[in-house]
Image (tube, coloured by chain):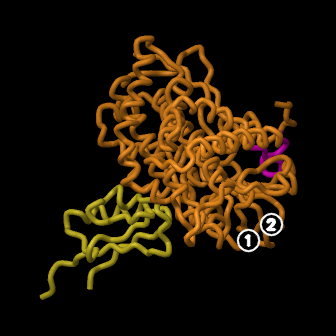
Amino acid sequence: MSARRPVSDWATDWDHTDPTWIENPFPIWDDLRKRCPIAHSERFEDGAHFPSRYADVREISYDTEHFSSRRVIVREKKFHPVMPSPPITSDPPEHRPARMPLLPAFNPKAIEKLTPDTRALCNRLIDGFLAKGKCDAATDYAQHIPTRVIARMLGMDEEDGDRYRRWIKMALEEGIHDNDKVMQSLKEMTIYFSEELKKRGTQSGDDLISFMRNQRIDGQPLPPDKLIGTLRLLLIAGIDTTWSAIGASLWHLATHDEDRRRLAADPSLMDTAVEEFLRAYAPVTMAREVIKDVTINGCPMKPGSMVLLSFPAANRDPEMFPDADKVRIDRAENRHAAFGLGIHRCVGSNLARMELRVALEEWLKRIPEFRLEPSARVTWSEGTVRGPRQLPVVFA
Amino acid sequence: MSGPIRLKVQVAAERCQGHNRCYSIAPELFEIDDYGNARAKGDGVVPPELEEKARLAVKNCPEHAVRLSQKT
């Protein structure tokens, strides 16, 4: 990646790919909330706004009249034309028919069925490194959970998960600065799914691809390009996100002895702990494109400009959450927005919660004592999804 | 003399986006349809021992879709 110009002022020149932001964005957001709750930057084509208050993020999330989802990533150079991945890139009225067919595959009953396999997977991963007394919790553990779970859900080979990870890195990280990477990633995914559909012919099984192929909208199956667009979305949306949530939670537990010991000793805290990790380390930041002149919290926004829609920043707003900057694993009232607000609520939220919970439960059962490897470096992903990408830990 | 005040939960269908927090906190009080949308079970009347759970379901709904009212 090319060197980026240093940020002169976060209020007028913010950059969510700047190393300071990547490493620890929270002080930046706290500062902006006080002095410039909707920051601006000309680093991105047609300019981009960054609201850091919960109330503003919420208002924009609900306002589909002035804000479109056709572009959901803030990039240096916009894609022309836009590349649809319905339903995440859909606006009303197309959004609902694109979303509805997906929902039953992710309801609580459907996800509950995946829990035993996920538990077994976590334990197989732990078996692989437990005796060594250390591992990289991001690359040896967290990363493999969503990739393999989604591969199985799709009815694909579990080992294909490694290829998914590469495509996602190209689309979400490298792709912010380099549109060719995004194109390459989308092309490879399209070929992968096209070949699979061809191979399957008319065969149908108990998996998500079969489920999607059997869906009918007004009596018609999904056209192949829409089906493949949605399958690509499932990969992009379901992997780095959950990987990041698991990794960030383990990072917190590795660096906060009291919380780790309390949670290991009292698993009944897991419900509130999972929600609190999701609030405090919400991995996903989305975007909207302004499509009509609008003023949010006194800030005029012009059509064409982008909005970085940071659920992580909203979740750290002290006006909404008492002690917003503190992780309280027993926080009982937690209206966090980690999975978004409004019509684009993450379709996979039940799946993500299950994976995060099971990953932490199985880890803590077998590795209740662990900490960061003293000499090693933790690195965090940049851009749209935030989580640790290297997390070397040693077990006690 | 009137009986003790009972509480009733309701889910505003037009606000619910299927986060399923209410169901996760109080499966005794809420149910979820195939599409992930929540509704109150039965008549929504909250037994006294579930009042705290009902309050938490309200306070954890990201969409402010869950309401608690006094049963009339």
Magenta span includes A346: no
Q: Mark 1 points at which residue?
A: A66
Residue A39, disc = none
Chain to which mark 1 belongs: A
| Residue drawn at 50 percent across, 46 percent down | A278
Q: Is mark 2 on a helix, strand or loop?
A: strand
Q: Cα distance, mark 1 to mark 2?
A: 9 Å
Q: Position of residue A66 (x, y in %)?
A: 73, 71
Which shade is chain B? yellow
Chain to which mark 2 belongs: A
| Most frequent secondary structure within the magenta stretch | loop
The answer to whether residue A84 is left or right of residue A76 is left
The answer to whether residue B41 is left or right of residue A386 is left
Question: Where A338 falls versus A288 (above or below)?
Answer: above
Q: Where is residue A159 in the image (x, y as percent from the top left)?
A: 54, 29
Q: Name the residue under label 2.
A: A301
| Residue drawn at 49 percent across, 54 percent down | A211
Magenta span includes A11: yes
Amino acid type of the residue that numbered disc 2 sits on in the rendered structure: Met
In front of the other: A348 or A30? A348
Highlighted range, magenta: A7-16
The answer to whether residue B22 is left or right of residue A295 is left
The answer to whether residue A60 is left or right of residue A280 is right
